[in-house]
Image (spheres, helix red, strand yellow):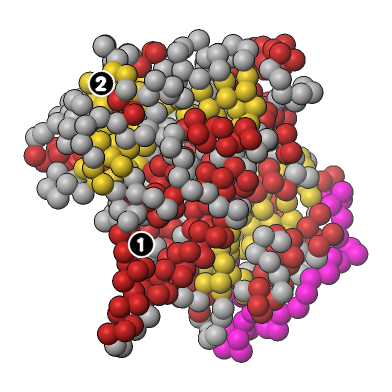
Amino acid sequence: MAYTSLRAFVDALEQAGELVRIKEFVDPVLEIAEVTDRISKAGNRNKALLFENTGTGFPLLINSMGSDKRMCMALGVNHLDEVMNDIDALLKKMSTPKNGLLDKLAMLPQLGKFASYMPHVVSGRGACQEVVMTTPDLSKLPVLKCWPEDGGPFITLPAIHTKEPATGMRNIGMYRMQVFDDTMTGMHWHRHKVSARHYNEYKKLGKRMPVAVALGGDPVYTYAATAPLPENVDEYMLAGFLRKKKVSLVRCITQPEIEVPADADIIIEGYVDPNEELIWEGPFGDHTGYYSLPDWYPRFHVTAITHRKDAIYPATIVGIPPQEDAWIGKATERIFLTPIKMTMVPEIADMNMPVEGVFHNLVIATINKEYPGQGQKVMNAMWGAGQMMFNKILVLADGEAATGVRIDDYARLAKEVFDNLDPATDVYFSQGPMDVLDHSCSKMGFGGKMCIDGTRKTEEEMNTPAAAYKMPGSFSAAMLKTKYGEITSISDRLMREWGIPVLFVAMAKDRPGHVADLHSRLCTEPGMEGLKMILYVEHTVDTADIADVLWRFCNNLDPRRDHMYGGPVRNILGLDGTRKTKKYDSFDRPWPNIIVADDVTIKTIDNKWSSLGLGELLISPSLRYKTQLYRGGATVLDEEK
């Protein structure tokens, strides 16, 4: 289904009972983000929000794709697997051998249908150019400042258009844009991104780089800008396939080399000068739940702002999960499963990215295993597959056909994995490129990876027969907490309730090598027989909260650097997911704080809540994390314990 504008999508959401209009003034500086954070974590009260009074001439839509239902509505399907099945059918049909003329002729309707999804440029102006600002001024847009330590307001849902200067190949990506003044922003494209490569090409040529930013229009455009497509695939080809209608493009007014969707809501035109001095951009409360810290990025200069007469400004917030981006990630998980399966990893049965893993940190894959070593083969293939190169922890299990366990039944799947796991032989460590936002790496963008092969082992792979775990009667979490004063919290829930041999330990470090030392001592305690893994987190974390433990642990771990083995036969794997410091860990990079709202904003929204039309007061999610916050602002003071 194709939406003719963002307002058409708003109407559909409202008719489905998925949107709340807020008429009361809510400030784009901190307040809109606080309201949205409460709603996005509110279960069945989670709705899209249309803020109609932003103090500007534009209403603001947020959390529009922040649930499974709304993500499906954005893509025009009832279930995300429908898109996966469409792609599967298309690729299978195109890859089937065509032996005769009739077989080839039978493909023509399919190819013709696919060709009808290709973007095309139309003459004249589009709806996105109905109004041209006499003097472009970013302050007229309701740009959000989301979190108290953010470096300023950020445009958070921009579809950024660039072109490769030699070939004219278009790329649409999504990178945050910090607003510095009325006509200048930062352009936060990481070194691995296609737009960054385009930037480097323009730098070699000594030319200004034309850039255009599209906001709104069909929500498929927003999704396509986030999709991990190969470099030579036009994002608007994917958008056309998803909406079953080609995308009509118009040339920009001041940057005519760039084409943008004719039915977008707002267009920001401009340029980046590769020879200009970079600007110190950030910090920014990011999707990891931590601040990404400041760094040098290019400047984007605005030459024009155009918009529809009835334009809506789209935005999102990211922070401690779950947020709207989790559902966008789920769409990618389903849509790109078939291409991965058909082009790189044919044995893959399913894939899942748990919300707590914030995309790259934790990926689960089930496979149809047929021979020894197949898990390692899949590991290497996946770490070489596009943006999967950023994956930190990969967990492999046998497919549902073999186990009867769904990939999203995490408790049963974890038991299946650990029943088949020998930590001494079935956990693999490597290193390679990592997301620039991964703060755990000793060097930015380069760090450790880990694969946990929980597939059923063949005779060739097995040292000792696998056996289901049963928690020994001699094990006592209370005794361990009493005996070891550095342990602030300990949870044996996985062991006790589900027979999963994994222990959570929160500890207060006070010396170098403390985690390794504690691990060595714990592994000799009574009741440790059969235990396979201990996850260590910092002292502020409540180990009773499994989701929070996994979120903090996955963010703070560099698996290659932070692992250790203990026990009489060195088969209990310890993983250090604590905060790293220069004093105790010889860690030289700054460490970011987690993201929470400030007390003044929380109180302001508490007082406004009854006038927002959102029902009974929702308590700020930030309050539960206040005790986990360190001093120092976006960057933790190194002397903090």
**Residue 441, position as x, y percentages in the image:** 45, 46
The image's mark for residue 113 is 1
- Between 323 and 559, the one lying in front of the other is 323
- Between 185 and 543, the one lying in front of the other is 185
Q: Name the mark nearer the viewer: 2 or 1.
A: 1
Image quarter hosting the C terminus = top right
Q: Is residue 34 magenta?
A: no
Q: Describe the element under mark 2 as helix, strand or loop.
A: strand
The image's mark for residue 329 is none
Q: Main secondary structure of the magenta part?
A: loop
- Between 258 and 42, the one lying in front of the other is 258
Q: Amino acid at mark 1?
A: Lys
Q: Is residue 467 magenta?
A: yes
Considering only vertical position in the picture, is 375 above or below 488? Answer: below
**Residue 367, position as x, y percentages in the image:** 56, 74
Magenta region:
452-480
Q: Describe the element under mark 1 as helix, strand or loop.
A: helix
**Residue 577, position as x, y percentages in the image:** 60, 47
Which residue occupies 69% across, 46% down? 547
Which residue occupies 81% across, 62% down? 498
Instruction: Identify the residue position indicated by label 2 in the image.
Output: 304
Q: Which residue is situated farthest in the left direction here?
A: 205
63 displayed left or right of 186: right
Which residue occupies 50% across, 20% down? 59
Label 1 Cα neighbours within 10 Å, binned few <14 / some 14-19 / many ≥20: few
146 displayed left or right of 225: right
640 displayed left or right of 415: left
